[in-house]
Image (cartoon, rainbow, N blue to C red):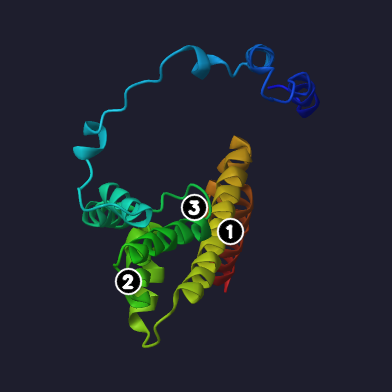
C-alpha cells in the first residue's frame, strides 16, 4: 500500500484541466493511476452483475437496507431447539472423576446452565444442586445422604463451599491411609514375627513368665506335701 505522501506526489503531477490541455491532462491522469495501481477500471470493462444472485435468496418486498439486514439475519438464525437438546445432554452426562477440583466441576455445570438460560430454558437452583449431587462419584455417598437428611436446601454457592470441604476431608483421609500402609510395609520381618509372637502369647517374655509360674506351682505342691 502506497503512503499518503507518494499518492500526493503522483497527483501533484496532474495538471488542472482547462479547455486546451485535455490530452495532456488525460495522459498525466493515466500515468498517475497506473503508478497507484488503480487504472484497471479505465482499461477494462466491469463484470456483469446478475440479479439472480439476490433474487433466489431475498424477497422482492425487501427494498430498504434495514429490512435487508433483518431478512439476512433470519437466514442465519440458530436452531434454538437443537442447541437446547445438545446442552441438556451435556448437562446430564457430566460426571466428576476426581480430575481437577470439584469447584471447577460445579462451575462448569453452572456455565452450561447459563447457556441453557440464554436459549430460553432456565433451571431452578434446586434442580441445579440435584444435578451436581448426581454427578458426584461414590466417595461422596455419605455427603449425599447427609444433604438428603437435612431440611435446609443449599444454593449453588453453599453447595460449592460444602463440596470443597468434603473433598479436602476425603483427600486427608486418603493420605492418612496411604501413610499407615507405607509404615506397615516398612517394618522388618523380625519385628513382625516378634509382634505376632507377643500377640499369640508365645514370645520370650511370655515363656519366661510361664516358667516362673510353673516353679511357684511346684514349690507350693511340695510344701503342701510336707505339711
Q: Where residue 76 sits in the image (x, y, percent)?
A: 30, 47
Relative depth, front residue between 1 and 141: 1
| Residue wearing tag 3 | 200
The quadrant of the rendering that contains the N terminus is top right
Mark 2 residue element = loop
Q: In front: mark 1 or mark 3?
A: 1
Q: In this view, does 222 lie above or below 28?
A: below
| Residue wearing tag 1 | 172
Instruction: Residue at 76%, 29% (x, y): give it.
Output: 4
Determine contact: label 1, label 3, CB under 8 Å.
no
Relative depth, front residue between 87 and 141: 87
Q: Where residue 71 sits in the image (x, y, percent)?
A: 28, 52
Earlier along the polypeptide chain: callout 2 or callout 1?
A: 2
Label number found at residue 123: 2
Label number found at residue 67: none
The quadrant of the rendering that contains the C terminus is bottom right
Q: In front: mark 2 or mark 3?
A: 2
Amino acid at each position: 500500500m502506497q503512503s499518503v505522501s507518494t499518492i500526493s506526489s503522483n497527483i501533484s503531477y496532474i495538471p488542472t484541466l482547462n479547455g486546451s490541455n485535455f490530452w495532456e491532462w488525460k495522459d498525466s491522469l493515466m500515468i498517475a493511476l497506473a503508478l497507484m495501481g488503480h487504472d484497471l477500471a479505465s482499461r477494462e470493462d466491469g463484470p456483469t452483475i446478475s440479479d439472480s444472485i439476490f433474487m433466489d435468496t431475498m424477497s422482492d418486498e425487501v427494498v430498504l437496507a434495514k429490512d435487508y439486514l433483518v431478512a439476512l439475519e433470519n437466514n442465519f438464525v440458530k436452531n434454538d431447539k437443537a442447541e437446547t437438546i445438545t446442552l441438556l445432554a451435556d448437562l446430564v452426562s457430566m460426571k466428576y472423576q476426581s480430575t481437577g477440583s470439584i469447584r471447577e466441576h460445579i462451575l462448569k455445570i453452572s456455565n452450561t446452565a447459563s447457556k441453557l438460560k440464554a436459549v430460553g430454558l432456565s433451571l431452578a437452583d434446586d434442580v441445579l444442586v440435584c444435578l451436581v449431587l448426581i454427578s458426584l462419584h461414590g466417595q461422596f455417598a455419605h455427603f449425599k445422604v447427609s444433604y438428603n437428611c437435612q431440611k435446609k436446601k443449599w444454593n449453588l454457592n453453599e453447595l460449592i463451599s460444602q463440596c470443597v470441604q468434603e473433598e479436602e476431608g476425603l483427600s486427608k483421609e486418603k493420605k492418612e491411609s496411604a501413610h499407615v500402609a507405607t509404615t506397615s510395609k516398612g517394618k522388618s520381618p523380625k519385628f513382625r514375627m516378634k509382634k505376632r509372637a507377643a500377640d499369640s502369647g508365645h514370645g520370650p517374655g511370655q515363656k519366661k513368665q510361664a516358667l516362673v509360674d510353673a516353679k511357684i506351682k511346684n514349690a507350693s505342691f511340695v510344701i503342701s506335701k510336707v505339711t
